[in-house]
Amino acid sequence: MTEKTGIWKIASEAGAAGARAAVAGLVVAAGTPPVDRARFLTSLSARLRDRLDQGGTWELHLLTRRTTPDQECRLDVWLRPFDERGRRGPACEPTLSCPLPNPPARDGAPVDASPSHALLSADEDTAAVLHLLDEQERLVQLHRDELHQTNQGVLALHSDLEAAALAQRELLEAERSARAEVERARRLLNFLADASAAITSSLSPTEVLRRLTDLLVPDHAARLDVWLLDDEEEGDEESGPVPERSRAAVVAALTSLTVGALRNARRAGIGLADQACLADQAVFAQYGGKVYASTLLLEFHLATGTVRAVDAGSPQLFRQRGDHTERVELDAQLPLGMFEETPYDEQTFQVEPGDRLIVVSTGVHGARSAAGDLFGERALRQILGATRSTPTYETARAVVAGLVEHYGSRELMSDAAVICLDWQGRQG
């Protein structure tokens, strides 16, 4: 159902103001919500102002419509040009529409359309809109406060997560350290269990000598010849007397224990320095520092020629490359078993195919003649240079022969050990 509510001719600002006041009175009387009313009247004012700027006479048409009795009634407004000869042009813009919750009756009381009343109504509309804006601002502030609290909670949660991650990393590090200590203890216990038979049999030199070859031969070797050279004199490797035990038995037991400890540590797959630490603990646990072992540990990498070394004592190491002989300087560290829980560090150097390594013990490079002259490095270099082209065993024999000649007797004050090795690298 559609009804024409009114038509206004507009040719001046006064006419536009009167038409707007009439429309405002109509929507106010119909109970249009303030926000819808303000939005509708603002759009209408803008269109009226635009038509006045264009000039001429215009008609303002009002139309109320309701499709069904239950449907909300609406007010439609449009403008069209009107000339003096009564010709009407088409509507220039889309229709403005506004809801009318309580449309006025045909015979109802007239609506106050005076500009003053419209102005006051506009102020009321403005006040209603400002009130709604205030409510929206309060809601925005409330949401802003809630968002701020949420952000603070997120920051606190993030801080807690970082603290938890740090604690987890610390726990993981502690767990790794604990596992390493457990593994270290397990290897030591395995070694002690494996070495218990050798320690027990050390009371019998004959049994130790019988088992020594088995201890020294690595898993990958086909055979290995072992000689244990000893004399009846007290040597530098004993720091005090051992009652009720011959020196031969002590040396045999010490050798068996040390070699067994090193072999078991190597089988456990740990580094060279840790192997020395385990052997040091085993020897000290057995002898309490009264007896110790001077040892040089070497580990060769076949592919690269890198050699890892731990000098646990005071041997000297020489390297021959071509016709040049040089001493490989290693940090002298404490012998195995001298003190409890001695730390050891490993060093590295390189060998190339064709190099020869010669190791001499303290009983060789520290031997003195009857006149007090030290055998020393100079004599060693002369012998090593003269035997460079001979087999390794000939070089070792030449060093021992030169030592005996320098000392003046085969009855040396200290044990003398010479090891000579030719490095060929990995073949094929």
Image: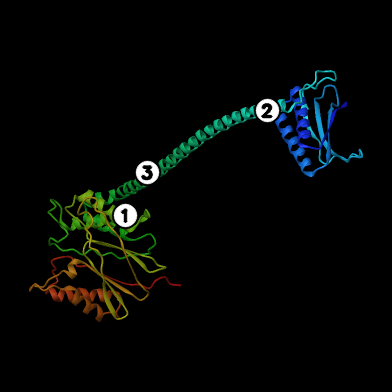
The CA distance from mark 2 to mark 1 is 90 Å
Q: Residues within 10 Å of mark 1 (few under 14, many from 20)?
A: some
State which mark lies toward you, 3 or 1: 3
User: Mark 2 highlights which residue?
Assistant: 125
Q: Earlier in the sequence, mark 2 or mark 3?
A: 2
58 displayed left or right of 230:
right
**Between disc 3 and disc 1, whose residue precedes?**
3
In depth, the one of 165 and 7 nearer the eye is 7
Q: Which mark is residue 174?
A: 3
Residue toward you, 38 or 191: 38
In the rendered structure, which amino acid carries the disc numbered 3?
Ala
The image quarter containing residue 293 is bottom left
Q: Amino acid at mark 2?
A: Asp
Q: Is residue 106 above or below residue 223?
A: above
Side of 342 where 159 appears, left or right: right
The vertical placement of 314 against 69, above or below, is below
Q: Find out whether the residues at labels 2 and 1 contact each other: C-beta distance under 8 Å.
A: no
Real-space CA distance between mark 3 and mark 1, rounded to the nearest whole angstrom = 20 Å
Q: Which scheme is used to colour this image of the protein?
A: rainbow
**31 vs 149: above or below:** above
Q: What is the x, y in percent for residue 57?
A: 84, 39
Residue 320: percent from left, percent from top: 29, 76
**As rendered, which of 400 and 142 lies closer to the eye?**
142
Q: SS for tag 1?
A: helix
**Residue drawn 28% across and 48% down?**
196
Horizontal side of 216 relative to 303 (left or right) equals: left
Q: In the rendered structure, are the residues bearing label 2 and label 3 in contact, judged by CB atoms less than 8 Å apart?
A: no
Please name the residue that numbered disc 1 is placed on. 274
Q: Residues within 10 Å of mark 3 (few under 14, many from 20)?
A: few
Type of the residue with mark 1: Asp
